[in-house]
Image: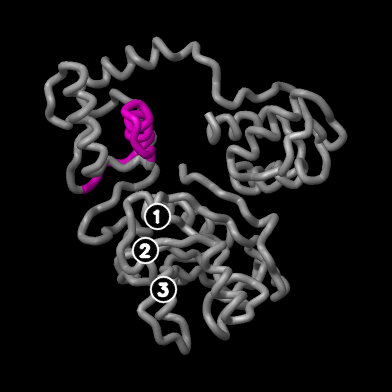
Amino acid sequence: MAKIDDIRHRTKRSNGTRALSKITTIVRHHSGGSSGNFDTFWSFWNGERGWGTGGYHEIILRDGTVQLCYDPNEITNGVGGQNSYTYHICLVGNGQFTDAQEAAWDERIAYNMQRLGIKVGSVKGHREMPGASTACPGIDMNIVRARISGGAVGGVQIENPASTKHKLGDRILRNQSPMMRGDDVKTLQKAIGVTADGIFGPSTETAVRKYQEERGLQVDGIVGPATVKAINNKASKSADKKKKYPLPSGVLKRGSKGEAVRQLQTALNAANFRVGNVDGDYGPKTEDAVRRFQSVYLPRGVDGIYGPNTRKELDKVVN
């Protein structure tokens, strides 16, 4: 699951809103540079162009982190003259994108297509929009749309996301084409200390080889029974360690106070759904942060109240 950095509470806006039913197209962009985020882009948008609203609803950073910049009903400045009906997602880069970014794109495009009722033919690149003259999004959108439909990207077949729910040890993991993806790869990556993007690529293979060498295992970069056994033994020894962000049980809501609220606020800040100061007071900022978190992870249960379902999803994110 992509890491979410929810910054909607602090982004500037001036364009107004539209009904979600008016959104008929999702547009993919690239930033045109090898680095950056909303804040660096804002200095150009606002400082040089004088915009009161940014260009994109979501920005996917190089490590795969997704910055949520605006709610879908807000009109941004992604494509001149076409913003009343479009939702904009930008990948930071100039025609070259990381595996983590593409994995995050796959996740976010599937989510947004479902919630907005968008068909694959209405997922467009910036340069495909009426009146546009640009190299953006720096990738062949026919390939991107083929991947969404279960085809290939960059000549590499991508597994259907529905087939990625594996436990570590269910299958042999290795660096191959198509690249292996799934929950078991994430578990492996967490165990060997690399970015857990769920994609078994060259960097993961290198880390596996190092892990195997340090433990006297056969160094082949392949995760078979012996490597899985070593990982599981390590996991069992550390299973009783305290969680980094302990979460309270029960129900918390507007007006709640105390240490349980402090724990919740600390975890929300760590998950990038920021509440500001950790003061133990479940006030409007904490309620808003819970709503923003729920809108991403529990879209059918957005009520601003912390309960068992919110606890479960927040625990997955921070622990």
Q: Position of residue 287 (x, y in %)?
A: 77, 42
Looking at this view, is 115 or 214 the one in front? 214
Q: Where residue 183 sits in the image (x, y, percent)?
A: 38, 34
Q: CA distance from mark 2 to mark 1?
A: 8 Å
Q: Which residue is mark 1?
A: 62
Instruction: Kindly check if marks 2 and 3 are in contact, taking CB atoms under 8 A apart as contact.
Output: no
Q: Is residue 293 above or below residue 52?
A: above
User: Which is more foreground, mark 2 or mark 1?
Assistant: 2
Query: Upstream in the sequence, badge 2 or badge 3?
Result: 2
Label 1: which secondary element: loop
> How many numbered callouts?
3
Residue 194 lies in the magenta-colored region: yes
The reply to whether dot 2 and dot 1 touch (C-beta < 8 Å) is: yes
Q: Is residue 92 left or right of residue 221?
A: right
**Which range of residues does the magenta coloring cover?**
178-196
- From mark 3 to mark 1, how far is it between C-alphas? 19 Å
In the rendered image, the vertical position of residue 203 relative to residue 24, given as above or below: above
Q: Is residue 253 above or below residue 82?
A: above
**Residue 254 lies in quadrant:** top right
Q: Mark 3 belongs to which amino acid?
A: Gly
Dot 1, how many residues are within 10 Å of its Cα: few (below 14), some (14-19), or many (20+)?
many
For disc 3, the marked residue is 125
Residue at image mark 2:
34
